[in-house]
Image (tube, grey):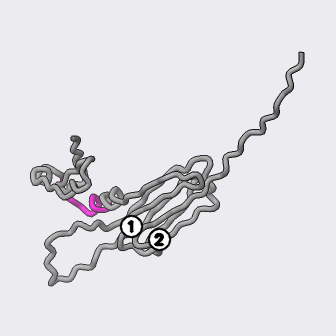
Amino acid sequence: MSVIPNFFGTGRTTNVFDPFSLDVWNPFETALSFPRSEVSSETAAIANTRIDWKETPEAHVFKADLPGLKKEEVKVEIEEGRVLQISGQRTKEKEDKNDKWHRVERSSGSFLRRFRLPENAKVNEVKAAMENGVLTVTVPKEEVKKPDVKPVQITG
């Protein structure tokens, strides 16, 4: 089995085949990693935005897990003609001086994901909806036109 190191300085490793492997803490990795900064936690927020892309006969459908975000905090844009861009901002919870934090695992910061859409995408008819922390972006597809085939009669 392949174990892939996490480059964001969290001291955790990810096993490609085990969905619960993010809960494995490696104390030696933290000791050898670079000091954490606001930039690395923002990078982690960008990298941790999970998006599925499936193609149906009618459309390309993107689903993004964005728990805790409101639709006003998320932007869906088409840029450069055929690039779908999903971005947003998750703000950090305000800290009270009397609070004692034992663990902080939820990411905060900006996230941005881009997808180059295929030629058959109808970029002027994109629809987006947010429900229960899941953003669904639907990009309809153009119908594939079958070429006109004319039979040619063979003489002779």
Magenta region includes residue 36: yes
Residue that carries the numbered disc 1 in the rendered image: 66
Q: Nearer the viewer, residue 108 or 55?
A: 55
Q: Amino acid at mark 2?
A: Met
The residue lying at 65 percent from left, 52 percent from top is 142
Residue 38 point in image, percent of width and height: 27, 63
Evaluate if marks 1 and 2 touch, with contact meaning CB atoms under 8 Å apart. yes
Q: CA distance from mark 1 to mark 2?
A: 9 Å
Number of on-image labels: 2
Give the image quarter of residue 42.
bottom left
The residue lying at 22 percent from left, 56 percent from top is 20
Residue that carries the numbered disc 2 in the rendered image: 130
The residue lying at 57 percent from left, 58 percent from top is 139
Q: Is residue 9 left or right of residue 76?
A: left
The residue lying at 22 percent from left, 47 percent from top is 5
Q: Nearer the viewer, residue 76 or 58?
A: 58
Q: Secondary structure at mark 2?
A: strand
Q: Is residue 39 left or right of residue 26?
A: right
Q: Amino acid at mark 1?
A: Leu
Mark 2 nearby-residue class (10 Å; few <14, some 14–19, many ≥20): some
Residue 100: which numbered mark, if any? none
Q: Secondary structure at mark 1?
A: loop
> With respect to residue 81, does 95 lie above or below?
below
Residue 128, can we see it? Answer: yes
Residue 81, can we see it? Answer: no
**Of pointers 1 and 2, the one earlier in the residue sequence:** 1
> With respect to residue 147, does 88 lie above or below?
below
Q: Which residues are magenta?
A: 34-42
Mark 1 nearby-residue class (10 Å; few <14, some 14–19, many ≥20): many
